[in-house]
Image (cartoon, helix red, strand yellow):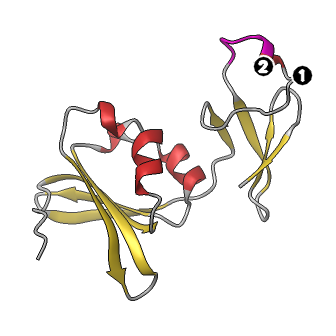
C-alpha cells in the first residue's frame, strides 16, 4: 500500500486525466519550487476510471491557474489549510495564454524576433481553439 501523507497547507490538483501530471508539473515549473510536490499517477477513480493527482505544499501563488486551465480545464483545485479542504476551485479555458504554446507559422514575428512572448487568445471556446495574437495562426489541441 502506498502512503502519501496529507498536507497541512497547500494545494491538491485532482481529477487530472491519467498521464497528464508530468506535463502539468513541467508547464507550471513545479520542478523549480523548493517545496514538497507529490505526483500520484494512475489512481483508481469511480468517475474517470484512472486519474492523476498532484499535491503541492504551500500557497496558491505557486501555480498559474491560466496554464492549468489551458492544459485541462476539468481539473479541480483543492486548497488545504490546517489539514482540511477549505475551498474548491473549478477551472475554465483562459481567454489569453502567454508562452505556453508556440506559433508554428514560420512567417510569424515570433519566429524572427526571439524575445517576443508567444501570446494566444481563445478564438472558439466550443472547439478549444486558440489563435496567435500576431499572425492569427490557429492552434487546436
Mark 2, Cα crowd under 10 Å, few <14 / some 14-19 / many 20+, is: some
Residue drawn at 79 percent across, 33 percent down: 104
- Corner quadrant of residue 49: bottom left
Residue drawn at 60 percent across, 51 percent down: 70
Looking at the rendered structure, the number of numbered marks drawn on it comes to 2
Judge whether 105 appears above or below 30 on screen. above
Mark 1, Cα crowd under 10 Å, few <14 / some 14-19 / many 20+, is: few
Judge whether 139 appears above or below 32 on screen. below
Residue linked to disc 1: 107
Q: What element carries label 1?
A: loop
Q: In this view, does 1 lie to the left or right of 71?
A: left
Q: Does the magenta stretch include residue 64?
A: no
Residue range (magenta): 112-116
The kind of secondary structure the magenta stretch mainly shows is loop
Q: Where is residue 11 in the image (x, y as percent from the top left)?
A: 28, 54
Q: Where is residue 39 in the image (x, y as percent from the top left)?
A: 29, 56
The image's mark for residue 111 is: 2
- Pointers 2 and 1 in contact (C-beta within 8 Å): yes
Residue drawn at 54 percent across, 45 percent down: 66
Amino acid at each position: 500500500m502506498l502512503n502519501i501523507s496529507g498536507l497541512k497547507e497547500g494545494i491538491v490538483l485532482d481529477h487530472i486525466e491519467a498521464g497528464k501530471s508530468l506535463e502539468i508539473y513541467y508547464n507550471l515549473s513545479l520542478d523549480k519550487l523548493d517545496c514538497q510536490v507529490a505526483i500520484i499517477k494512475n489512481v483508481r477513480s469511480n468517475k474517470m476510471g484512472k486519474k492523476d493527482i498532484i499535491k503541492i505544499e504551500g500557497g496558491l501563488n505557486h501555480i498559474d491557474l491560466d496554464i492549468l486551465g489551458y492544459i485541462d480545464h476539468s481539473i479541480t483545485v483543492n486548497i488545504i489549510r490546517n489539514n482540511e479542504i477549505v475551498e474548491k476551485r473549478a477551472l475554465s479555458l483562459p481567454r489569453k495564454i502567454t508562452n505556453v504554446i508556440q506559433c508554428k507559422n514560420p512567417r510569424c514575428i515570433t519566429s524572427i524576433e526571439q524575445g517576443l512572448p508567444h501570446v494566444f487568445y481563445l478564438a472558439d471556446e466550443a472547439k478549444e481553439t486558440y489563435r496567435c495574437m500576431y499572425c492569427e495562426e490557429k492552434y487546436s489541441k
